Image (spheres, rainbow, N blue to C red):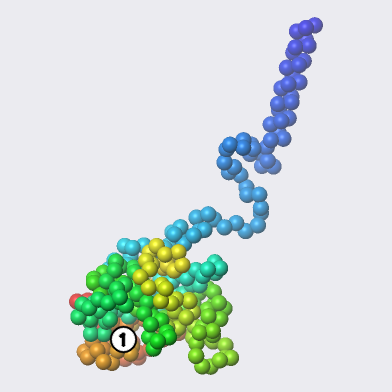
Amino acid sequence: FPVRVALSRRIRQKKRLLEAEELGSDRHGAPTPSPTEPRLGKPASLGPQRSVYFSSPKSHSARLGSEFFDQPAISLARAFLGQVLVRRLDDGTELRGRIVETEAYVGPEDEAAHSRGGRQTPRNRGMFMKPGTLYVYVIYGMYFCMNVSSRGDGACVLLRALEPLGGLETMRQLRSTLRKGTVGRALKDRELCSGPSKLCQALAIDKSFDQRDLAADTAVWMERSAPGTREPVVVAAARVGIGQAGEWAQKPLRFYVQGSPWVSVVDRAAEQNTQSGPAVSICAHESF
């Protein structure tokens, strides 16, 4: 009899343990972890989830790092075409645009560069800093232009135009607030970033961004174009608005995506040269 009672007690204990294990499993049969173990099951909410790997700009796998910017101005100006510039505002809004037009400024020998003759000033210091440093300057006392330093002292690339990809309404509001004239007329999408000062207005870029590191900053960075994106046909044309730079005013150091409606200035003659022999117009000036 005592043996029978002990056996019955063990059977009841085993039954309770089995019931407890069953209650401790979720609906898919995965065991519930103890409080000290990380839970790897489904999230509590079935709504949209944001991956922790994309919670900050530094974690973007597509973000371009310092090594990308460490190349001569001409090759960097061309390499920028198709890449995506991202601006994160204080409220978390991200403004995005694909680069479609750039200008190269190759250093002290370039009569159109702010670093011509090798002169360094507090204003142009960003041009002499490590590749990927922003050089933002003021023109006409009220507009901004954004450049990125490249390999070589005093060399940089001016960002001239973007194809807006995200945050267009915010861009429109920023442009409408800052621009002069044509008050009351809604800007068309192609007018948002079709010029160096326009894109700075649209992305809320001002002098406070001067000398920031584009490879590490949390408010502005650059991302690689999406995988599988077709390589654009690149036009090499004369730079814009530097008529006082002698022979340098005619050198084909402005690069843009042929056929893009977002480009600021189209050069038909340069496009004809591109169609007849782009390799010559590019390689002949690699020594600038």
Farthest residue toward the right? 1
Residue occupying the point 73% across, 30% down: 19
As drawn, is 215 to the left or to the right of 243? right
Residue occupying the point 78% across, 11% down: 5
Q: Is residue 40 visible?
A: yes
Nearest to the observer: residue 167 or residue 82: 167
As drawn, is 256 to the left or to the right of 51? left
Q: Is residue 251 visible?
A: no
Q: Secondary structure at mark 1?
A: loop
Q: Quadrant of residue 248?
A: bottom left
Quarter that holds the N terminus:
top right
Q: Residues within 10 Å of mark 1 (few under 14, many from 20)?
A: many
- In the rendered view, would you say 32 is above or below 274? above
Q: Position of residue 220 (x, y in %)?
A: 44, 69
- In the rendered view, would you say 77 is above or below 112? above
Farthest residue toward the top? 1
**Residue holding disc 1:** 239
Quarter that holds the C terminus:
bottom left
Residue occupying the point 62% across, 58% down: 48
Residue occupying the point 41% across, 81% down: 144
Q: Amino acid at mark 1?
A: Arg
As drawn, is 175 to the left or to the right of 135? right
Q: Position of residue 196 (x, y in %)?
A: 40, 82
Q: Position of residue 99 (x, y in %)?
A: 41, 76
Q: Position of residue 112 (x, y in %)?
A: 26, 85
Tally of numbered tags:
1
